[in-house]
């Protein structure tokens, strides 16, 4: 895992196609703005954990693996 320090307004680019930008709201909370192509699923961690459903086709798979098997749903990127 790569850990980076970023200030609000700064961003990182992943694989020349995904941009993750750090934002700060009026309450001082940090937010992440993610710009990715439509084929890249973006799912919050707590939603990913809820998707740990066991079915015959994704037996033993969770989260992203289950999504790749066609059993998970990604959230809209907008």
Image: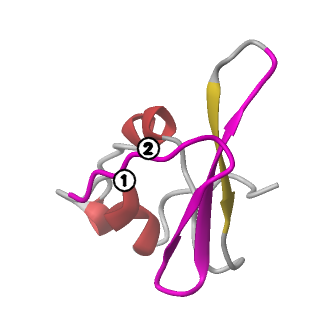
Residue under circle 1?
A: 63
* Count of numbered marks: 2
What are the residue bounds of the magenta stretch?
Answer: 1-26
- Above or below, comparing residue 3 to residue 46 in the picture: below
The local crowd at label 1, few if under 14, some if 14 to 19, many if 20 or more residues have their Cα within 10 Å, is many
Disc on res. 48: 2
Quadrant for the N terminus in the image: bottom left
> Of label 1 and label 2, which has the lower sequence position?
2
Task: Identify the image quadrant of residue 18.
Answer: bottom right
Q: Is residue 16 above or below residue 12?
A: below
Which residue does the image show at 75% across and 55% down from the upper left?
A: 76
Q: 21 or 42, which is in the foreground?
A: 21
Q: Residue 69 in the image: state x and y as whole percent.
A: 40, 73
Q: Where 8 falls versus 13 (above or below)? A: above
Q: Residue 72 in the image: x percent, y percent?
A: 50, 57
Q: Is residue 66 magenta?
A: no
Q: Any magenta on residue 20?
A: yes
The outermost residue toward the top is 27
Query: In front: 69, or 22?
Result: 22
| Residue 76 falls left or right of residue 7 | right
Q: Position of residue 44 (x, y in %)?
A: 53, 42
Q: Quadrant of the C terminus?
A: bottom right
> Dot 1 lies on which element?
helix
**Residues at badges 1 and 2 in contact (C-beta under 8 Å)?**
yes
The local secondary structure at tag 2 comes to helix
Residue 13 is situated, as x and y percent measured from the top left of the image, at 53, 73
Label ID, residue 52: none
In this rendering, the answer to whether 29 lies above or below 62 is: above
At 81% from the left and 18% from the top, the residue drawn is: 26
Image color mode? secondary structure
Side (left or right) of 66 relative to 47: left
Packing grade of label 2 (10 A; few <14, some 14-19, many >=20) is some
């Amino acid at each position: 895992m790569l850990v980076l320090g970023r200030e609000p307004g700064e961003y990182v680019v992943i694989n020349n196609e995904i941009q993750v930008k750090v934002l700060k709201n009026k309450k001082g909370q940090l937010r992440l703005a993610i710009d990715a192509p439509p084929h890249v699923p973006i799912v919050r961690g707590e939603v990913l954990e809820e998707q740990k459903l066991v079915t015959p086709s994704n037996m033993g798979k969770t989260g992203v693996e289950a999504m790749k098997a066609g059993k998970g749903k990604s959230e809209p990127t907008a």
